[in-house]
Amino acid sequence: DANMKFLFMSREEIEKEDEEIIKSINETPAHKAAKRRKLSEEAQEADDLKKRLEII
């Protein structure tokens, strides 16, 4: 249950989670687009590698 999990989280875990949320809120649309582009490129490279391995 999510409520119980939240209650048992340590203060450090809560602060870390809060920092991540604030960081994502403060991220500009350009940063978000760059991150998506990078992830897309990494996924494409992984697919290309899989195809090469299937051929061999």
Image (cartoon, grey):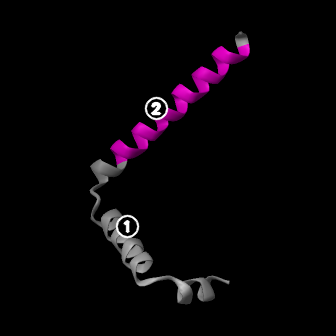
Q: Residues within 10 Å of mark 2 (few under 14, many from 20)?
A: few
For this view, does 24 lie left or right of residue 4?
left
Residue labelled with disc 2: 41
Q: Residue at x 42, y 73 (%)?
A: 17
In terms of image quadrants, where is residue 1?
bottom right
Sequence-wise, the earlier of marks 2 and 1 is 1
What separation in Å lies between label 2 and label 1 (alpha carbons)? 24 Å
Residue labelled with disc 1: 20
Q: Report helix, strand or loop for mark 2.
A: helix
Q: Residue at x 30, y 49 (%)?
A: 31
In terms of image quadrants, where is residue 7?
bottom right
In terms of image quadrants, where is residue 55?
top right
Find out whether residue 38 is within the magenta segment.
yes
User: What's drawn in magenta, residue-wise?
Assistant: 33-54
Q: Amino acid at mark 1?
A: Glu
In this orientation, which residue lies closer to the viewer: 2 or 26?
2
Q: Residue at x 42, y 44 (%)?
A: 36
In this orientation, which residue lies closer to the viewer: 43 or 9?
9
In this orientation, which residue lies closer to the viewer: 53 or 30?
53
